[in-house]
């Protein structure tokens, strides 16, 4: 199967996609003896010889693999951290031979479903804004409740950088007498710390945030923080099926 040369190098563990793109543009990569300088050119790694700085790339024919990981709180959704923080790569190191990269991100202070994959096409489909894949979150938030706050949460909300969020379905799962409430958010966009800013706009403080679904794929009840498993073919198909608007969306 053909994929972008920058993704082939990334999957083979040569470098990150961004670094691989820089190497390609610098003329350091050859495909079947010919220098390529366009990171988005596509090749079938099983049918071509790829070299970086004159050395053949091993592992370019790595099998495609996608896993679901229950990211714990305090773990970064990156492959490395210059400050020495624990990353999702640390959880998989020595246990997964393929070089898998996070599909999207989940804040350090958040937990829940995170996909990791070496499938470039799947990653693009799940992260590019034009596909608008819905993600579902359960949030524990503290603060005095009112129906006006629910109206604010449903948006639009202006973020600190000036970006205005799109209206989205927000449901009340439970209201606590201690002013700690459980809310369900369904987002089709993923601005950094978006839910936390939305809650702040409604004068609520997020105590815990958990992603429980990506599209129609749900986080299994028996998967614990730090655990992971491979996606079955049926689960992979769920990721490419359209997510139909929820009933809540009709009232937003």
Image: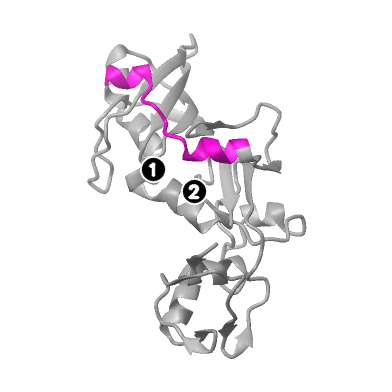
Q: Residues within 10 Å of mark 2 (few under 14, many from 20)?
A: some
Residue depicted at 42% across the width and 27% down the height: 185
Picture layout, residue 107 above or below residue 142: below
Dot 2 and dot 1 residues touching (CB under 8 Å) = yes
x and y, in percent, of residue 78 in the image: 55, 56
* 9 is higher (above) or lower (below) than 174: below
Give SS at disc 2: loop
The image quadrant of residue 197 is top left
Q: Which mark is residue 190?
A: 1
Q: Residues within 10 Å of mark 1 (few under 14, many from 20)?
A: some
Q: Is residue 78 above or below residue 180?
A: below
- Quadrant in the picture for the N terminus: bottom right
**Quick check: 164 left or right of 75?**
left
- Check if residue 8 falls in the magenta segment: no
Residue interval drawn in magenta = 234-252
- Which residue is pictured at 72% across the width and 58% down the height? 93
Total labels drawn:
2
**Residue at disc 1, secondary structure:** loop
Residue underneath mark 2: 105
Q: Look at the image and say whether residue 241 sits in the magenta stretch.
A: yes
């Amino acid at each position: 199967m053909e994929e972008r040369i920058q993704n082939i190098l990334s999957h083979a563990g040569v470098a990150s996609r961004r670094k691989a793109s820089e190497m390609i543009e610098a003329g350091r990569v050859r495909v079947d003896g010919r220098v390529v300088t366009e990171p988005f050119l596509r090749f079938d790694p099983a049918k071509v010889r790829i070299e970086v700085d004159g050395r053949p790339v091993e592992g370019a024919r790595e099998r495609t693999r996608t896993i679901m990981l229950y990211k714990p709180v305090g773990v970064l959704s990156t492959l490395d951290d210059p400050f020495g923080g624990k990353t999702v790569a640390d959880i998989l190191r020595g246990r997964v031979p393929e070089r898998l990269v996070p599909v999207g991100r989940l804040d350090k202070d958040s937990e829940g479903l995170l996909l990791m994959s070496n499938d470039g096409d799947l990653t693009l489909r799940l992260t590019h804004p034009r596909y608008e894949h819905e993600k579902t979150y359960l949030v524990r938030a503290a603060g005095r409740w009112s129906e006006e706050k629910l109206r604010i949460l449903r948006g639009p909300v202006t973020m600190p950088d000036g970006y205005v969020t799109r209206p989205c379905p927000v449901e009340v799962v439970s209201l606590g007498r201690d002013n700690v409430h459980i809310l369900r958010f369904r987002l089709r966009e993923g601005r950094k710390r978006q839910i936390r800013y939305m809650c702040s706009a409604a004068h609520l403080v997020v105590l815990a945030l958990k992603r429980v679904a990506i599209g129609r794929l749900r986080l299994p009840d028996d998967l614990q923080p730090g655990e992971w498993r491979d996606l079955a073919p049926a689960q992979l198909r769920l990721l490419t099926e359209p997510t139909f608007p929820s009933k809540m969306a009709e009232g937003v």
